[in-house]
Amino acid sequence: ATVDGFDPVKNEWDKEGTYAKVPQEGDYGVVKNSITGDVWTGGLKKWSAATKTWSDPIVKRAPKGVRFPYAFDSKRNQIFGLNFGDGQGYGEKAIGAIRVPVDGKESIQVTFKDSDAVKQFIKDEPTYCGMDYDPDNDRFLFYCGQGAGAGRVFVIKPNETNVWEMSVYAFGPGSATPPDSGGAGINNRFRYVPQLKGFVLLARGAENLYFLRTAEAPKK
């Protein structure tokens, strides 16, 4: 539960005890609010970047929670979590999805319209995945990359209801297929980079980086 900080400018650790410990049952930090800098944990505890304090704002929880991954939806000011089972290959063999308005007090269950992509997601039983929000196209991209799923990116399209849509990303001609991510998984090494207008993937520690452009980069 200990939280430590490192100052890259001074090249030294912050003084021990500078930051409060993660509250009991807080779990690990899983997503950052890109607007405020606040950090949420898998247990839905929130760390405020402004006050440097922890809080437990969620008093009403969805029936089926999510362990990881999560991403911040800047359009709707909410975080979204999606996994299969418990995200690590255990638990109930079912999709778990929730959205959490960051200024609210509840986590809300999200379900998906039936589609071939949903069936494929269930068949894949993805573990140790990565996901991030694509603000240019108002969608989440989710990636596992294990086995036959290497190169298969799931697209989650949010809306103002609690029933969303899932599809499989259609790559352009000549696109490269990254290698199998292996049993260790992606673990969120699949991130949207605003300056590049796309996603960067590190499939394995000893592999090259892969880049997926999702919008036109701004002209210099």
Image (cartoon, rainbow, N blue to C red):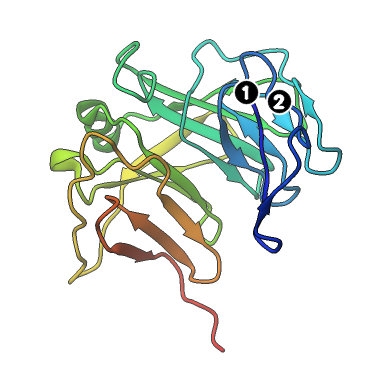
Count residues near mark 2 (Cα–Cα under 10 Å), then give few for <14, some for 14-19, many for 20+.
some
Residue bearing mark 1: 1
Name the residue: 54% across, 80% down.
218
Quarter of the image containing the N terminus?
top right
CA separation, marks 2 and 1? 5 Å
Q: Nearer the viewer, residue 86 or 184?
A: 184
**How far from the left and from the top, in percent, is residue 116?**
24, 36
**How far from the left and from the top, in percent, is residue 71?**
54, 41
Quarter of the image containing the C terminus?
bottom right
Vertical relation: 18 (above or below) 10: above
Q: Splitting the image into 4 quarters, where does residue 93 fall?
A: top left
Name the residue: 57% across, 22% down.
27
Element type where label 2 sits in the image: loop
Q: Relative to residue 194, is residue 68 drawn left or right?
A: left
Count residues near mark 1 (Cα–Cα under 10 Å), then give few for <14, some for 14-19, many for 20+.
few
Q: Nearer the viewer, residue 139 or 89?
A: 89
Name the residue: 28% across, 51% down.
203
**How far from the left and from the top, in percent, is residue 177?**
19, 59
The amino acid on which the numbered mark 1 sits, given as a three-letter code, is Ala
Q: Relative to residue 28, is residue 58 drawn left or right?
A: right
Residue bearing mark 2: 21
Q: Relative to residue 215, is residue 71 drawn left or right?
A: right
Do the residues bearing badges 2 and 1 touch, measured as CB atoms within 8 Å?
Answer: yes
The amino acid on which the numbered mark 2 sits, given as a three-letter code, is Lys
Name the residue: 61% across, 36% down.
79
Q: Nearer the viewer, residue 39 or 148?
A: 39
Q: Splitting the image into 4 quarters, where does residue 51 fall?
A: top right
Vertical relation: 178 (above or below) 128: below
